[in-house]
Amino acid sequence: MSEDQEKLMRKSPSNGIPELRKAIAEYLYEFRGLSISPERIIIGAGTEYLYGLIIQLLGNEHTYAIEDPGYGKLGKIYNANHVEVKYIPIDNQGIRLEKLEDSGADIVHISPSHHFPTGIITSIGRRIQLLDWAKSSDGRYIIEDDYDSEFRMSGRPIPTLSSIDESGKVIYMNTFSKSLAQTIRISYMILPDELYKIYTEKFNFYSCTVSTFEQYTLAKFIERGYFEKHINRMRNHYRNARNELLKIIKENSSVEVNITEEHAGLHFLMNVPTTLTDSELIKKASDNGIIINCLSQFYHNPEEAPEHIIIINYSGIEEAKMKEAIEILYSNISKS
Amino acid sequence: MSEDQEKLMRKSPSNGIPELRKAIAEYLYEFRGLSISPERIIIGAGTEYLYGLIIQLLGNEHTYAIEDPGYGKLGKIYNANHVEVKYIPIDNQGIRLEKLEDSGADIVHISPSHHFPTGIITSIGRRIQLLDWAKSSDGRYIIEDDYDSEFRMSGRPIPTLSSIDESGKVIYMNTFSKSLAQTIRISYMILPDELYKIYTEKFNFYSCTVSTFEQYTLAKFIERGYFEKHINRMRNHYRNARNELLKIIKENSSVEVNITEEHAGLHFLMNVPTTLTDSELIKKASDNGIIINCLSQFYHNPEEAPEHIIIINYSGIEEAKMKEAIEILYSNISKS
């Protein structure tokens, strides 16, 4: 980087330096089947910042729909930006279309490649229905949050909504804060043509929120293949951790559990037989040194929430401690 | 920094790492007479981002007042955030109080230590009136943008509004994008107690928009005195450039000009005798390779704008070219 001192002192375009946008476009073409012009990429300091920018772009008179259960921060971000937000239930295909229709929302914010926290992958059929929903009215848009899509562990990836969108209705988003480190604040979104035009007319006075130093560094990291290598290495690491944990669970037959959604992301769901409530389960585990989350904690409407489904995030568990952790967890369940 | 690898991977608190907030608080205490708790500092990726955060914090149902003339981006930012904005004229003491009252605005956004682009420093009397205005109603706040205050060239600095604010009505802001480099996106604001409480209750779910790497680097840069040294060096450099340019202007008596507001910031005003309109003046200079701005370009209400006042920004002029530049400029003026 020290050879590029002069470049580092030149102001970045509002949507980010061309080198980084080009590197991202090439990466997406190769690994995500997305063929887009680097022009339409907007770089920003984290997806949370970009959500705010989307609300500025689309307007705060709209109703925004998000998935229930879902990532708790999303509702907070929409509330913080003073826009109306509706929570839409999901089924095993993805967000429920009839509930989305009923909500009166114009904008829907989803993570179709890997729903958080259930891990559900939106089916092709539902994707097409979602695009039809968006097409049927002028102000409708889909925000496709593709975070974590790098960590698909098995099976063929489903094409992004963005790549099959022919009507310019999808805003694609992804972040390097998940795939590299949460302390790096670099995310991007890809605007459809019409929105990109509005962006260049009304919003490109904004300074890019990521320093040129970090933009050039990341551009080089991707261009030279290090990002791809890093992702492959991490995916293998996480896959091994997942397989090890699944093996330990299979071998321990003291409790009969049911595992689902283990093919993507860094967690899976474990349905456990217990007479405890979820809060009791969490409390007991915590008293014994095991931190767990239950799916029910991620519901906005608690009456919709299923009980006794534990979210097992294996990205942070040391392999040496897995066996003991499962034993402790099981002893809590069976004591009920 | 490579000794701190583990620290660099730990998530920053929402308002920034404690080390950076402490370093800023100590700097402000020593050089700006501001005695504040580092807790109340919020670090963000540029002031533009922080303006958006302030609107989220205060709400978009308010009317925001900004100075006319002023920094053109401000109006755009408020418009982009879909809030009502009023342009308030200024006089040689600062923003005009009676016009502010008439506007119905609750929030006023000013740069009292060095108004852009006039360079006017808000008088002590006007500062006290502004604080009284803010105190007289519950939802009123003053955003004090202290950008450029590091580059006061002569005379004693006037205390910030924030330092004489006893009612918790001032949000102080400053940026390192001006004092270090525009390609570094690090700014901060200091919230009064009541707003800080709202921030911690409702907004501290937000991730800090500056990477930990850049936060730790800047913290060390300030702690170890490099920032102070850098500012002193730049101030001397700019003061020499200013003095040189003023000398050249004084020595060239072919046109009688009037210089004002040369004591702070990196520009001064030059009132020139000419029968040309400002657009003609700018066009002629540009045809001869001299890029100038006129004060009238920074007015939202053009009928209020005085003509024939050129803004001379001396931060980017090579000393070797100053003499020639003034000669070309003068020949354009007198040809009129």
Image (spheres, coloured by chain):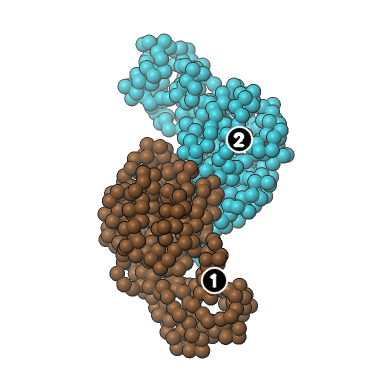
Chain colours: A cyan, B brown
Residue at (57%, 38%) from the top-left corner?
A61
Per the model, the C-alpha gap separating discs 2 and 1 is 43 Å
Mark 2 or mark 1: which is in front?
1
Tell me where residue B264 sits by quadrant: bottom left
Q: Position of residue A55 (x, y in %)?
A: 55, 42
- Whether residue A21 appears in this view of the structure is no
- The chain letter under disc 1 is B
Position of the C terminus of chain A, as image quadrant, is top left
Above or below, comparing residue A170 to residue B111 in the picture: above
Residues at discs 2 and 1 both on one chain = no
With A74 as the anchor, is A103 left or right in this view?
Answer: right
Q: Nearer the viewer, residue A169 or A320?
A: A169
- The chain letter under disc 2 is A
Q: Position of residue B240 (x, y in %)?
A: 39, 78
Badge 2 marks a residue whose secondary structure is: strand
Q: Nearer the viewer, residue B275 or A236?
A: B275
Badge 1 marks a residue whose secondary structure is: strand
Q: Which residue is mark 1?
A: B293
Q: Position of residue A188 (x, y in %)?
A: 56, 46
Q: Nearer the viewer, residue B271 or A326?
A: B271
- Whether residue A99 appears in this view of the structure is yes
With A109 as the anchor, is B43 left or right in this view?
Answer: left
Residue at (47%, 58%) from the top-left corner?
B88
What amino acid type should be assigned to the residue bearing mark 2?
A: Ile
What amino acid type should be assigned to the residue bearing mark 1?
A: Asn
Q: Which residue is mark 2?
A: A107
Q: Residues within 10 Å of mark 1 (few under 14, many from 20)?
A: some
State how many labels appear.
2
Q: Nearer the viewer, residue B8 or A321?
A: B8
Residue at (49%, 72%) from the top-left corner?
B311
